[in-house]
Amino acid sequence: MRVGLFIPCYVDQFYPHVARATLTLLERLGCEVDYPLEQTCCGQPMANSGYEHLTGGCNDNFVRNFAGYDYVVSPSGSCTLHIKEHLHATNESAATAIRSRVYELTEFLTDVLKVSALEAAFPYRVGLHQSCHGQRGLHLSQMSELMAPPFSKPVQLLNMVNGLELVELDRRDECCGFGGTFCVTEEAVSAKMGKDRVADHLRHGVNYITGVDVSCLMHLEGILKRTGSPVKVKHIAEILTATV
């Protein structure tokens, strides 16, 4: 299958190693992966700020770059959800086709590739941050307030990593407070929510915090660095490709 690799702009600019890990993982699993060079922002920041009517250029560019692939895969739950729910373009038939085959990385691995084993090792205590867009928008995991059987696609994959000890948190699906432009317009609330989320991981003695959204991890990483914590963050793609 031909996969178009969709790398959000902030990942491209600040966390390119996450993009490389995603590419490595997909190729290890037998995918033919292309990276369209003319891709840019998906338009989510504008849409979240109330300016979705100005995202037409982003949408048309996205369609030009990703039309024709069997699947479009991204290491970002929030950007994937934006495309899945909001991509409309001049070529609407192509946009509709893309919306039906765009996947966040972990849902692609579990739902499409149906991965049952990974050659990865990561001998550390790891806390999983289940970001809101992934959990409540893409349904990557069950929401704890629902009386329903629990599941988690990221946990399913992390359990395949040799030596990894997944730590149970007190509030496993609490928001970190990043929220895209929310962290700019409501910075005090955002920072306090992030501190609370970090504290839950620290109470349980994690070595690393992981998740499916680099944006959330970036927010948590900033708090960890400012407090001098030795705890690090790693996107799930980095852990699923780790060999140490």
Image (tube, rainbow, N blue to C red):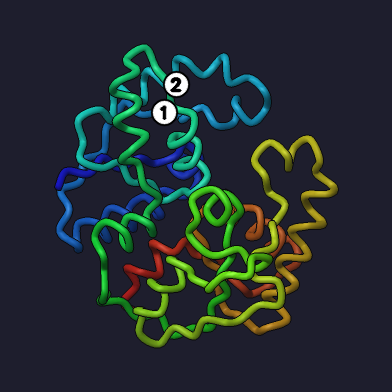
Element under label 2?
A: helix
Query: Is 221 situated left or right of 98 in this image?
Result: right
Q: Name above or below for residue 5 compared with residue 90.
A: below
Occupied quadrant, residue 198: bottom right
Q: Which residue is mark 2?
A: 58
Closer to the camera in the image, 112 or 243: 112
Query: Is 86 situated left or right of 195 in this image?
Result: left
Residue type highlighted by circle 2: Cys
Query: Is 233 situated left or right of 109 in this image?
Result: right
Residue type highlighted by circle 1: Thr
Residue beneath the point at 20% across and 46% down: 33
Q: Are marks 1 and 2 in contact (CB under 8 Å)?
A: yes
Q: Nearer the viewer, mark 1 or mark 2?
A: 2
Tell which residue pokes out farthest to the front in this image.
Answer: 147
Give the class, few, some or many, for how many residues have Cα within 10 Å of label 2's Cα (few <14, many ≥20).
some
Q: CA distance from mark 1 to mark 2?
A: 7 Å
